[in-house]
Every structure is written in C-alpha cells, then in structure tokens.
C-alpha cells in the first residue's frame, strides 16, 4: 500500500510520543513492504526532502508569525500536498495531527480513506502549555480544526482506552469509528542490562555521581504537564532519608532553567544532574544506567512510551496514575503506580521503593519479559494494516 503520513511539525530533536509513534510505525510499515511518505513542516535540522531512518520526509518551512504566518502555513500545506499527490495514487492517509489534515482536506480526493491517530486533545495541549496566556480564541480555533479533521477521518486510533474515552467525550465525530492500538518499543535499540552500575562509567562527564549510588532517572520534555518540577520537589522532600539517591533528568524544554533553579532553591542541586537533549542512541544508553525510572506526568499522558523504553532496558518504572499509564504499567505491577501526581504522592512512593531496592533489582528480568511479550511496533503495524484493509 501507498501511505501518506501527516504530522504538523517534525524535528530530529525530541518530538515526544507523537513523533516517536509516527517514525516507528512508518518504519514498521516500510519494512513490511508498504510505501510511506511523511509530509510536514520542518525545523532547521531537516532539509526539504530527506530520509530519516529510511523514511522519506517531504517538508516545507514557515518562518513568519501571527495571522500572516497562519496564512503562509495553510498555503505551504496545500502546495506540498499538490506536489506529493500529483501523479501518485495514495491508498490511505495516516494523520498524526489535526492541523495538516484540516489544511489539505479539500485538496485530497475524497475517495482516499483517512485514519487519524488521536494522541491527545490539541486545545488542551495549548491550554496547558500557555497557562494564563492561552486565549479563548486560540482554544476555540484548535477545537474547531480538530473537530473538522476528525469528522473527515474514516477511523480514529488511540493508543489507550483512556484517550479513546477522551476523544469520544470531546468530539461526537469519533463515535463509532475509534479503535485502540497500543504503542510499542524497539527491543534492539533499548537493550537489556542486569546491572545498571556497570553502565555508568561512560557518563562520568555529564553525570558526576558515584556509580554505587541509587540512580533515579526521568526523561521528559521540560513543560508543565510532564511534572518534572514535582519530581525534583519530591526528591528534596525525602533527601534526609535517602543519602545515596541521585536524580538524573534527561531531555530539554522551555522550563529547564526554572527546574535548575528549583533544585538549587530546594537544596538538592548536588543530587540532580541535567543531561539536556540526547540523540536516540545515547538516550537508549541512559536508560540502562538507572535503578529506577520515574514518569511524573500530571496531565495528557495518552500512553507513556517511556515506560516501555525503560522496561525494555530492565529498569523498573514508578509512575503517576494519569491517562493511559495505568493501562500500560498496572498489569505488570499496580504497586508501581503513585497515589497521585503531586509532590507528596511521588515522594511517598519513591521513598517506599527506595527502601525496597533489592526487590527493584530483582524486577529487572521481568520488566524486559513484560515488554517483549506485550508490546512491539510490529504488532502496532499489523493492527493498522487491518484497519487499512477494512477501509480499502
């Protein structure tokens, strides 16, 4: 099949869950013999036509802001769509964001079926990102665009039952056409280790902690909804009782400076290391250094791919009970779910598992087996293929 894949913007820097799902499913589809082309606008680290991990990306750039930028964005999508549609027959469109689908819907033959992946509600993402600066008009526009895009879609896919309920409650257009297809993990990239302390020497420049200490890791985009500030505060709260606990924070984002200041203000800057952005191969290696991974999300966690990545490396995961997280982590061990997403709940759970560190170490082989048995991008691909065939 020839599959046109849409996302609003893509970068080789961390793209979060949606970017990972797009790339991994596109790779799995191409490995199964399908043709897949990604159409999106780009950041500066991608050219106008480039192969990323074997996937062709057709991109365009919009530099202007405001109303003129929105107009240029619309025209950019339409021009790019005309270019990729001309002389080609697409069997299905797989959309990972409502904006490009809405922008190009009128330029696409109605006969081409559309499958939309609903990662999370776009207007709610906007509200959480901008807080008090989020305008009513901005939320209303995003709600309308997302509603129109979902109405144009023949099927709507979510990664969890939690996000399926979110989609159906917000958008009547989703009723009767949603399907849950969980995400996966690259088991070769995120490989297993039994003893994380042996992996730490390679990180001595970026992470100046003794290899004998208890390393807690999180990898998050530094934005409000991901809860990094609550995790830092939780570590500070229990610091007197956990003298050898160290926190490693991977990733970057607009709040990184604020989080560094928070660690200093709470007196734990010597216990917290920030790695900044890491390319995929180094990120996979970082997972292998941790005794425990923490996912402290406070909102809009539609699935939690980082849970699978950490567990593939053998690292047990402690997480907040937000969105799709309980569906992923609960069947393995419900005791690894915090009672809530606030500082107090994370601190209580973290201290409890720190005192059971031998039990955590014994979990490592079971973590790997769990993701091997339950989650793979090949299974995700097969489920998507079934939907494509139904629509064909």
Image (spheres, rainbow, N blue to C red):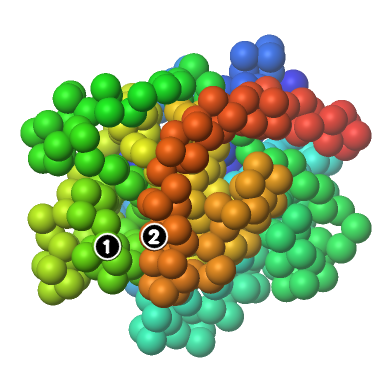
Q: Residue at x 53, y 34 (%)?
A: 363
Q: Which residue is mark 2?
A: 351
Q: Residue at x 16, y 63 (%)?
A: 268
Q: Is residue 303 or residue 50 the one in the foreground? A: 303
Q: Which residue is mark 1?
A: 241
Q: Is residue 41 left or right of residue 179?
A: left
Residue 168 point in image, percent of width and height: 79, 66
Image height of 282 relative to 105, above or below: above
Location of residue 243 by image quarter: bottom left
Location of residue 193 by image quarter: top left
Residue 167 point in image, percent of width and height: 73, 64
Badge 1 vs badge 2, beta-carbon distance below 8 Å: yes
Location of residue 43 by image quarter: top left
Using a 10 Å C-alpha cutoff, classify the residue at mark 2 as few (fewer than 14 neighbours), some (14 to 19) or many (20 or more).
some
Q: Residue at x 28, y 43 (%)?
A: 214
Q: Residue at x 82, y 53 (%)?
A: 178
Residue 240 point in image, percent of width and height: 22, 65
Query: Tag count in the figure?
Result: 2
Q: Is residue 324 or residue 149 the one in the foreground? A: 324
Q: Is residue 159 or residue 171 the one in the foreground? A: 159
> Can see residue 105?
no
User: Please, what secondary structure does the residue beneath circle 1 have?
Assistant: helix
The quarter in which the N terminus is drawn is top right
Image height of 257 relative to 113, above or below: below
Q: CA distance from mark 1 to mark 2?
A: 8 Å
Using a 10 Å C-alpha cutoff, classify the residue at mark 1 as few (fewer than 14 neighbours), some (14 to 19) or many (20 or more).
few
């Amino acid at each position: 099949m020839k599959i046109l894949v849409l996302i609003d913007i893509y970068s080789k820097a961390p793209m979060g869950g949606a970017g990972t799902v797009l790339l991994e499913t596109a790779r799995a589809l191409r490995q199964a013999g399908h043709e897949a082309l990604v159409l999106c606008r780009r950041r500066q680290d991608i050219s106008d036509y480039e192969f990323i991990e074997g996937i062709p990306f057709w991109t365009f750039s919009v530099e202007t802001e405001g109303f003129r930028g929105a107009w240029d964005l619309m025209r950019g999508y339409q021009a790019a769509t005309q270019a990729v549609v001309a002389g080609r027959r697409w069997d299905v469109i797989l959309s990972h964001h409502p904006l490009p689908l809405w922008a190009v819907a009128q330029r696409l033959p109605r006969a081409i079926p559309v499958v939309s992946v609903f990662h999370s509600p776009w207007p709610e993402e906007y509200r959480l990102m901008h807080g008090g600066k989020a305008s009513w008009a901005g939320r209303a526009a995003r709600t309308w665009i997302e509603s129109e895009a979902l109405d144009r879609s023949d099927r709507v896919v979510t990664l969890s039952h939690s996000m399926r309920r979110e989609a159906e409650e917000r958008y009547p257009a989703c009723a009767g056409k949603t399907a849950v297809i969980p995400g996966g993990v690259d088991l070769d990239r995120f490989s297993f280790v039994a003893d994380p302390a042996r992996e730490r020497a390679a990180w001595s420049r970026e992470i100046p902690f003794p290899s004998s200490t208890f390393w807690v890791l999180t990898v998050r985009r530094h934005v409000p909804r991901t809860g990094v500030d609550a995790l830092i505060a939780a570590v500070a709260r229990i610091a007197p009782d956990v003298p050898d606990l160290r926190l490693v924070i991977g990733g970057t984002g607009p709040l990184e400076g604020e989080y560094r200041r928070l660690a200093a203000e709470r007196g734990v800057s010597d216990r917290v290391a920030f790695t900044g952005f890491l390319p995929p191969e180094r990120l996979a290696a970082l997972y292998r250094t941790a005794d425990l991974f923490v996912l402290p999300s406070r909102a809009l966690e539609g699935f939690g791919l980082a849970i699978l990545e950490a567990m593939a490396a053998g690292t047990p995961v402690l997480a907040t009970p937000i969105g799709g997280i309980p569906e992923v982590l609960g069947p393995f061990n419900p005791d690894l779910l915090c009672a809530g997403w606030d500082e107090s709940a994370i601190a209580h759970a973290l201290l409890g598992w720190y005192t059971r560190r031998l039990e955590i170490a014994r979990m490592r082989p079971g973590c790997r087996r769990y993701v091997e048995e339950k989650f793979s991008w090949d299974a995700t691909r097969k489920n998507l293929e079934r939907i494509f065939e139904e629509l064909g």
